[in-house]
Amino acid sequence: MSAETRTPNPFFPHRHLLGIEGLSAAEIERLLDLSNRYADMTKDDSTARALLRGRTVMNVFFENSTRTQTSFELAAKRLGADVTNMSVGTSSIKKGETLLDTAMTLNAMRPDVMIVRHPDSGAINLLSQKVDGAVINAGDGRHEHPTQALLDALTIRRRLGKLQGLLVAICGDILHSRVARSNIHLLTKMGARVRVIAPTTLLPSNIDRMGVEVFTDMRKGLKDVDIVMMLRLQLERMQGAYVPSVREYFHFFGLDYEKLSVAKPNALIMHPGPMNRGVEIDSEVADDINRSVIREQVEMGVAVRMACLDALTRDIVGSNR
Amino acid sequence: MSADRKKSGLPLLLVNARIVDPASKRDERGGVLVENGVIVDIGPQVTKQNAPVDAEIVDCGGHVLIPGLVDMRVQLREPGEEHQETIATGSLAAAAGGVTSMVCLPNTHPIIDDVSGVEYIARRARETKRAKIYCYGALTQGLAGRDLVEMGMLSEFGALGFTDALHAVADAQVMRRALYYARTFDLLIVQHPEEPTLAAGGAMNNGELATRIGLPGIPACAEVMMIERDLHLVRMSGARYHVAHVSTAAAVEAIRRAKQEGLRVTCDTAPPYFSLNENEIGDYRTFAKLSPPLRGESDRRAIAAAVAEGIIDCIASDHAPHDVESKRVPFVQAAAGIVGLETLLPVSLELYHKGSLSLLDLLKCLTSRPAEILGLPQGRLAKGAPADMVLIDLDKPRRIDVTSFKSKSKNSPYDGRPVQGAVLQTFVDGRLVFATDGEG
């Protein structure tokens, strides 16, 4: 697909979805509304199935992922697209090919949408400048993971009816987390108040400048919150470099009922997965059917990704909408 | 005082004392009434006449009553090197030296880098029941300078701060993370300020004397280099940072600037650094081998002046017991450090007797200021405070005699030094733990 085959797309006036940072509140709202409709559709809705018929969606993952890649793959298939999965992490890079050479090679296969994950922040912005189709950022380094923030927002909206005015605590490894950054952008744009809670070693410099309140004590930071978002802490980061040990981390920052007791009585528990039970979250809390929406997040993931694929392909001439 | 009283829990009344308390700036004649280990009344109104009927009365004979000393840097060698010192002998030495609270370094065997180590020290201190003994936790696991210790949990179990003891944390990224992590719980980080690569292999202060006697030198700037590096990290992290045993003029200036800037920086020095200089080494005297090394005369003067000026917050003994075998070896091979618990007070009092600073200001460095930095309620004589008190003969002339030391090790460069001032009685929580007549 070349530039002249595009028409203006008033629904979503961006060629790519690279992050939440560049989106307006109205655009986020529209994406969430559309996602909500997909969430209510049956798996084999025939209108949806026709939407991307004949289109090619390429999953290009420079970093291993199971759940995100599968979620995107399912979303594309439910819209009728042809889907290919490229785990580049295990092939070209090891053969010494540069990111842009890989991108140009894949671009020559004429994908309509490339869904890309890369371990380096900014790599997907770079790649997006060199390809003809739309690019969706499925996570770049510690920068952004826009569909995760959207699916978190959809999950909250469907449970609590709104985002405006909610108090949300994001807890754990903020420093290395693209999920945290995308969520901070989205939630603050939509009028929620965001707190981050972590040991100081896991807080990036000047994080308060992103419009969040900073806490290092769970018992203070969780006070009266509506939502508790836990982040995964990678094992190699809790052996002394950032956190002394798993037990110390769990003691002070692991979400259990005792720490949760200062939050609002029905505060929702979220986690982007995969969870480390007994590290950042107690099993009882993770499995609390009244409060944990962790499985719902996964379910919303597919709907949100369908909406993003839909929104980004509406400018293609000949689309049946 | 009878042995009965110690067990009875009867009120204790000290009368006819000159009470000198830096925290309240009190310097007046009066008495102190103690019940259940706590000061319940203090001042000129406290006399024999209004004593409770059952009180044990101590007449202080007009001598000076001060808060028990709070020594923020000692090594007691237990667990692991009990042939050099134990918690029991170290506590005796402390009581004899007027030290009622002390914080030991984590460089024991095993190293205090987990909760059980902190608990061990606390338990042995309870059993010994003399001076109050606290500890620092290691800053990095195994003092290896790499992986952080469970500071949050150790702090909950009573560790008062974190330090790699005799080692500086060499890696700037590790130090950065240590300060950041400590900031999470607002914990104190104590640094041994010495650029380790510059100090490696050195045995004494770099300079003319080292050249003449052919010993490898440690440049004085190794100290300020490490402090300056850390101060940048302290500024970034907002953490509480304490510099141990400052020994150079340049370090004092760096700390002065940091304090003016408002950084949360404190420091201590030890008596050798304002009372001795490198010439003490003379003919390879290993008792004058310290870490950091004794410096030149201009640095010694600067340290004395910085104590007088208050730039240096505290004086700690830096008590480092070593057996004879560790010192009776060629200078380069000798262990560094001296016993200090029993010379801390008299050698510090030299600064007062010479007129460098007031008695209140000197005692502040030994009592209330270290207590404040460590977050301890003692170190002051006031209603509600623990009755940790020392009665001293402020002016008594005598010579330091290492054979009288209660410490198991006798490695002191001060043997035979004429000093003024002696501890008469030491009380911990109102219990007599030392008296010159041998009781306690």
Image (tube, coloured by chain):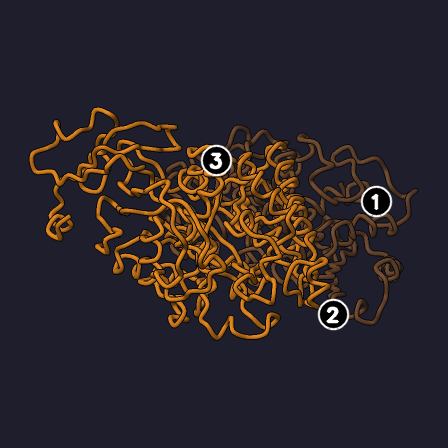
Disc 2 designates what residue?
A90
- Chain at numbered mark 3: A
In depth, the one of B326 and A175 nearer the eye is B326
Rendered location of residue B304, percent (x, y): 56, 42
In this view, the mark in front (1 or 3): 3
Q: SS of the residue at dot 2?
A: helix
Q: Is residue A7 left or right of residue B274?
A: right
In depth, the one of B112 and B391 nearer the eye is B391
> What chain is colored brown?
A
- Chain at numbered mark 1: A
In depth, the one of A204 and B304 nearer the eye is B304
In this view, the mark in front (3 or 2): 2
Which residue lies most toward the right here? A4
Q: Is residue B100 left or right of residue A112?
A: left
In this view, the mark in front (1 or 2): 2
Q: Quadrant of residue A273?
A: bottom right
A242 in relation to B257, above or below: below
Disc 2 marks a residue whose amino acid type is Thr
Q: SS of the residue at dot 1?
A: loop
Rendered location of residue A318, percent (x, y): 83, 44
Q: Colour of chain B?
A: orange
Q: Earlier in the sequence, mark 3 or mark 2?
A: 2
- Mark 1 in CB contact with mark 3 (< 8 angstroms): no
Disc 1 designates what residue?
A318
Q: SS of the residue at dot 3?
A: helix
Disc 3 designates what residue?
A160
